[in-house]
Amino acid sequence: MNIFNFFRKLGRLPLKVQIAFYHKWNHLRFYLYGIKFGSNLRVSTRCNLHLEQNAQLTIGDNFKLSSGSFINPLCRNIAAGIYVHCGAKLIIGNNVGMSSPCVWARKSITIGNHVNIGGDTIIMDSDAHSLNYEIRRTKEDQNDAQSASIVIEDDVFVGTRCIILKGVKIGARSIIAAGSVVTKSIPADCIAGGNPCQIIRRNTNV
């Protein structure tokens, strides 16, 4: 049996069996990728993972990542994706939970402790393409894209289907409403939402 047939047949098994297998499989996979991770890593089902040369991915204790298979109903069958470019850094703290995110680091993304990232959220620290239309016609398109570091501080909660763009800092304990597009930094202890994301009010439940 080749590897593709194995995973196809695995997908027909009960979800609990799949999750138990993928917890062990992804633990081995992350280790073989040279990823530094703490205790109790739990990555459920399949996860798209791409690390370029000299990329750095560091994960703290008790990291939980669900990926498709209706584990989180909001994500349906969307697989998680983690992409770290050459020389880029993705640092994830302790007790972080994510559901089917797309995390794309070209420079630096730092996620603090006790952070929850809602289903199908995109976090990307780059424009991905050049702002110059002439360069976008060439092979230098992505190389000319602007990048700026993202920082998500401790105890932040990001709702489902948010987009967090380059250069953003989200302060500790803030809440980002579902569907928000975060283009500018949000201070600590705020509830914010919208497109573009703006402060709605102070979060008094702290």
Image (tube, helix red, strand yellow):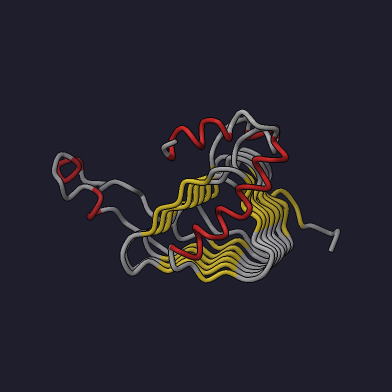
Residue 101 visible in this rendered orientation of the protein? yes
Q: Position of residue 57 (x, y in %)?
A: 47, 66
Give the x, y percent position of residue 195. Answer: 56, 40
Q: How many marks?
A: 0
**Residue at the (58%, 64%) spot, across then down:** 111
Q: Is residue 181 visible to the viewer in this orientation of the structure?
A: no
Give the residue drawn at x 69%, y 54%.
116
Quarter the C terminus occupies: bottom right
Between 96 and 125, the residue placed more toward the observer is 96
- Residue 136 lies in quadrant: top left
Give the quarter of the figure containing the N terminus: top left
Closest to the observer, 88 or 6: 6
Q: Position of residue 21 (x, y in %)?
A: 63, 47
In the rendered image, the residue lying farthest to the front is 1
Farthest right residue in view: 205
In the picture shown, does residue 63 fall above or below 191? below
Residue sitting at x 42%, y 58%: 105
